[in-house]
Image (cartoon, rainbow, N blue to C red):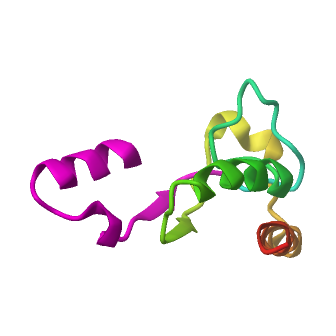
Amino acid sequence: MIRTFRSYAQEFGRDPSILKIYVRVNGLITTSPLPENRRPFLGGSPDQIARDLDRVRKLNVEQIFFSEMVDPDMDEYVTSNLDDYIESLARLQSLVHA
């Protein structure tokens, strides 16, 4: 999608290198890994998401923000404990900034 955006920008006379790209992830950050066959890109445990972010890094994205959306099919992986969720976010941040 990002490559297509940049291609269209160039086609319409814009310099794609100066256009900032922000990515919104409507996904799920879990405390334990999701099964790979059910896991959305940029969703799952901090370790799974960090691996996905390595792929995104190459696309020169300005910023990624997460807006957690709960998928009823993934209820078993959702934590209702705020401390566990914050710990998952902190782990993700430490993996990304390592």
Give how far across and how far down residue 65 sits, in percent: 55, 68
Residue at left offset 67%, top offset 55% = 53
82 or 7: nearer the viewer: 7
Give how far across and how far down residue 54 sits, in percent: 70, 53
Q: Quadrant of residue 3?
A: top left
Q: Which residues are magenta?
A: 1-28
Is-magenta flag for residue 4?
yes
Residue at left offset 61%, top offset 42% = 71
Split into 4 quadrants, where in the image is the N terminus?
top left
Split into 4 quadrants, where in the image is the C terminus?
bottom right
Extreme-left residue of the structure: 12
Q: Quadrant of residue 31?
A: bottom right
Give how far across and how far down residue 50 sits, in percent: 77, 56
Give how far across and how far down residue 16 sits, in percent: 28, 61
Horizontal arrangement in the rendering, residue 35 relative to residue 73 (left or right): right
Residue at left offset 81%, top offset 57% = 46
Is-magenta flag for residue 33?
no
Horizontal arrangement in the rendering, residue 26 relative to residue 15 (left or right): right
